[in-house]
Image: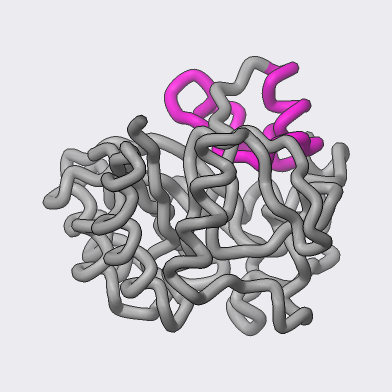
Amino acid sequence: MNIDINCDVGEGIGNEAQLMPLISSCNIACGGHAGDTVTMMKVASLAKENKILIGAHPSYPDRENFGRTSIKIANDELKKCIQAQLEELGTVLKSLGAVLNHIKPHGALYNDVAKDRKLAAVFLDSIEKYKKEVFLYVPYHSKIGEEARRLGFQIKYEAFVDRNYNEDLSLVSRKDPRAMIQDPKAVMDHLLIMATKGSVLTLSGRLVKIKADTYCIHGDSPTTLQILAYLSRHLPKNQILIKK
């Protein structure tokens, strides 16, 4: 079995050179919560060099809170903000001769469009011009996933291997100390259940059906590199390879 491991990059951590050989796709911060033209150019160049699929990681315009807080913003303003982020990354990719593979909203925006159908519609409207060209990474059983399929977007379902889940498939809040999974073996066990059983073990201990075409590991976790190195060593023992 081949799987896709994606990672959020260009967020100021500076570990991309070490991450890239261990993943198969990346999501580049494009100015909303982190990043600028310089970081986009640097990270996109690394991704191209490592033959990593490149994605855009747009966010609410909220650098102060790293895009992890829901904010009130007019629909038109949000659309313009998302489009500006994608256009800036697009300019960078064009200069490198690189191609945009996917779009994945970041942080609070990702969570909000997963449960708010109207906000999901606004986001989808803002990326309408990309719908035949790129994939949209969305959570399984989400409002944005339902709307995107209805409107003809190409979607890939995403699951998080370093985050704990609630029974409704929402992510455990980062305010809860149990939200993140940082032990490499625990992350691999979490991933194996998803990949082989099509289920996720929730924080309550219940197995809930989930579908995943791509698996995310957060680039800003203190154990990200250890987790990825562990997966690279041990997944093949379970007949699973990270596809490149």
- Residue 163 higher or lower than 89, as above or below: below
Which residue shows up at 30% across the image and 43% down it? 242
Image height of 181 relative to 6, above or below: below
**Residue 77 occupies quadrant:** bottom right
* Image quarter of the C terminus: top left
Taking depth in this image into account, of 48 and 237 the one nearest to the observer is: 237
- Report the front residue among 87 and 67: 67
The answer to whether residue 91 is visible is: no
Nearest the viewer among 238 and 21 is 238
Q: How many marks?
A: 0
Task: Place residue 69 in its image quadrant.
Answer: bottom right
Residue 98 position, x and y percent, is: 22, 40
Question: Where on the picture, by quarter, is residue 120?
Answer: top right
**Residue 131 colored magenta?**
yes
Is 44 situated left or right of 155 in this image?
left
> What's drawn in magenta, residue-wise?
122-151
Q: Tell me what residue is drawn at x 27 percent, y 65 percent.
A: 229
